[in-house]
Image (cartoon, helix red, strand yellow):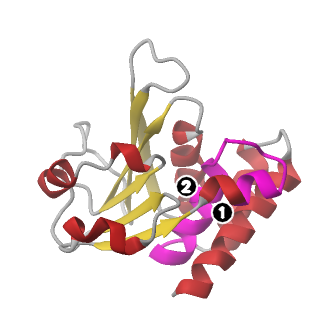
Amino acid sequence: MLEIKFSGRGGQGVVVASQILGLAFFKEGKYPQCYSVFGGERRGAPLVSFLRVDEEKILLKCEVRRPQELICFDDSLVDPQEVKNEVVPGGRILINTQRPVEAFKELNDFKVYVIDAPALSQAVGLGKIINTTMVGAYCRFMGHVELNHVLDAIGELAPAKREANIEAARRAFEAMKARA
């Protein structure tokens, strides 16, 4: 079973990103389970969302404690000690940041990928909402889910600015491909 943690701030599209990926996995015949943890959040407040994916129905009803993957929408939320305590050793981490991957040398027990998601989102007219950009980057560097299923899921779950959201995911996928 694959377990993924999404970490970000209110207004970045963290919850929708987990739903988009869940739907994309479902379109591939897998069983996703998606949930979020937040209180009376407001724009800018930290929040987390989780996604489990398996080849069989998921019967677990507990929280994800040791995900194999972390998608971090805000690099200020990356606490190396917390990551080491949460993500399984050797896990993979995607971080939205303007800093180079070398800036995260404290995470040398993990495979770390970085992307400047706001730059890509703003280039297609989406402003600061980076969910589809992060999902496109994830699709490329993880390789668990096909890009066409991600784009279909975006079309269903992000009907506002549909084409811009699809283009943001596509550009992020290509940007990550150039680094691989």
Badge number at residue 89: none
Q: Front-most of 17 and 120?
A: 120
Q: Mark 1 vs mark 2: which is more N-terminal?
A: 2
Q: Which residue lies furthest to the top in this view?
A: 40
> Which region is colored magenta?
120-145
Residue at 52%, 17% (x, y): give it. Answer: 42
Tag 2's secondary structure? helix
Q: How far apart are marks 1 and 2 (CA)?
A: 7 Å
Left or right, 29 with respect to 120, comes to left
Compared across the picture, whether 3 is left or right of 133 comes to: left
Whole-percent x, y for residue 5 in the image:
35, 49
Q: Is residue 146 left or right of residue 65?
A: right
On whether residue 46 falls in the magenta region, the answer is: no
- Report the amino acid beneath label 2: Leu
Q: Position of residue 91 (x, y in %)?
A: 26, 69
| Residue 175, percent from left and from top | 65, 76
Q: Quadrant of residue 111?
A: bottom left
Please report the residue visible at 68 percent of the width from the left and 41 percent of the height from the top.
Answer: 128
Name which quarter of the figure residue 115 lies in: bottom right
As drawn, 33 above or below 104: above
Quarter of the picture containing the N terminus is bottom left
Q: Give the residue at mark 1.
A: 150
Please tell me which residue lies in front, 97 or 92: 97
Q: Which amino acid does label 1 sit on?
A: Val
Q: Disc 1 vs disc 2: Cβ atoms closer than 8 Å?
A: yes
At 17% across and 63% down in the image, what residue appears? Answer: 88
Instruction: Decide which of 86, 121 is in the foreground and name it.
Output: 121
Task: Look at mark 2 in the image and give the residue it sits on.
Answer: 21
Q: Is the magenta stretch mostly helix, strand or loop?
A: helix
Residue 29 visible, this angle: yes
